[in-house]
Amino acid sequence: MLAQQTVLVVGGTGRTGGRVVGQLLDRGVNVVAIVRSAVRLPAGVAGHPGLTVVEADLLSLTDEDLAQHVQGCDAVISCLGHVINLRGIFGPPRDLVTRATSRLCRAIEASKPGEPVKFILMSSVSVDHPGNLDPRRGVLEKVAMWLLSVAIPPTKDNQRAADFLHSDIGTDNAFLQWVAVRPDTLREGDKTDYSLHEFLVSSLFKPDNTNMSNVAHFMCELATNPDTWGDWVGELPVIINPASADSRGGRP
Ligand SMILES: NC(=O)c1ccc[n+]([C@@H]2O[C@H](COP(=O)([O-])OP(=O)(O)OC[C@H]3O[C@@H](n4cnc5c(N)ncnc54)[C@H](OP(=O)(O)O)[C@@H]3O)[C@@H](O)[C@H]2O)c1
């Protein structure tokens, strides 16, 4: 019998993070959720015996507090993101995702787990593979991406968080391993089949769709299924809905 798993989730009050919390609890996984306001957690999870809620501003927690929260967790899932309004996009903290990612990873290292902890980041197709492995974007798209990164702070923040995992954590860290999941345009809707790709398959000008339920399902699979983890560890998989994928294939 598998040992009881515990997963720390940040961003659990968000559209995708809330689905992650619900799906993990449905799988019988213990969840620790650090949230700014517990009332924003999805209906149905409040009072669940497998859920521990820590009501706190993640970036204001001390290093010691963070290390204590990650202690004993098998995986950490971050679905944090800049709230889509003027304050969320242009106000502080502009480095929300990068800072949360680096602090959580350093807290995992400080806790010196016996087995590497899985760190799963919700990233975006606006993020380029830090190893320059994606197909080259066209000139117009490159210009558009550059303008976006200058004008829209979350674009640069998401890229820096992925760069941090790729360059600073790398693939031979004794205490943690990572996957950065890159969905395309997020949609409501039920869990469907979905396809996974090692590299970008669409362009900024012809985006694909990704149901948030599918992102949550894949993140939960990464956290709980060793085969799925083994397939994607250290990578930045792109996840899209099947109707979007048409004949472009994808990794099973
Ligand atoms: N929109 C898209 O089409 C798209 C596509 C691909 C990837 N993404 C990426 O996916 C991620 C998640 O998207 P989503 O739509 O599921 O997120 P969302 O619903 O906007 O939720 C954002 C989460 O981040 C938390 N948060 C925001 N600012 C915070 C802060 N300063 N301190 C602590 N927590 C904070 C929010 O907490 P509160 O409830 O307390 O505000 C919430 O839990 C984002 O990083 C986004 O870049 C988006």
Image: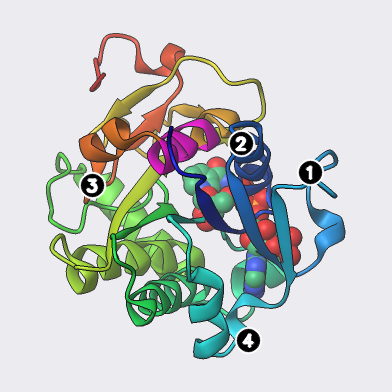
Residue 232: percent from left, percent from top: 25, 40
Q: Is residue 52 visible?
A: yes
Per the model, the C-alpha gap separating discs 1 and 4 is 25 Å
Q: Amino acid at mark 4?
A: Ser
Tell me if the residue at label 4 has its CB under 8 Å from ligand 1.
no
Which residue, given by chain and number where applicable, does mark 1 sit on?
45
First in sequence: mark 1 or mark 4?
1
Which residue, given by chain and number where applicable, does mark 4 sit on?
60
Q: Is residue 160 above or below residue 118?
A: below
Tell me the mark number nearer the camera, choosing from 2 and 3: 2
| Front one among 169 and 93 | 169
Residue stretch rendered in magenta on the structure: 216-224
Which residue, given by chain and number where applicable, does mark 3 sit on?
235
User: How many labels, in total?
Assistant: 4
Tell me if the residue at label 2 has its CB under 8 Å from ligand 1.
no
First in sequence: mark 1 or mark 2?
2
- SS assignment at label 1: loop
Tell me the mark number nearer the camera, choosing from 1 and 2: 2
Q: Residue furthest front?
A: 1
Residue 111: percent from left, percent from top: 39, 78
Q: Is 222 part of what is drawn in magenta? A: yes
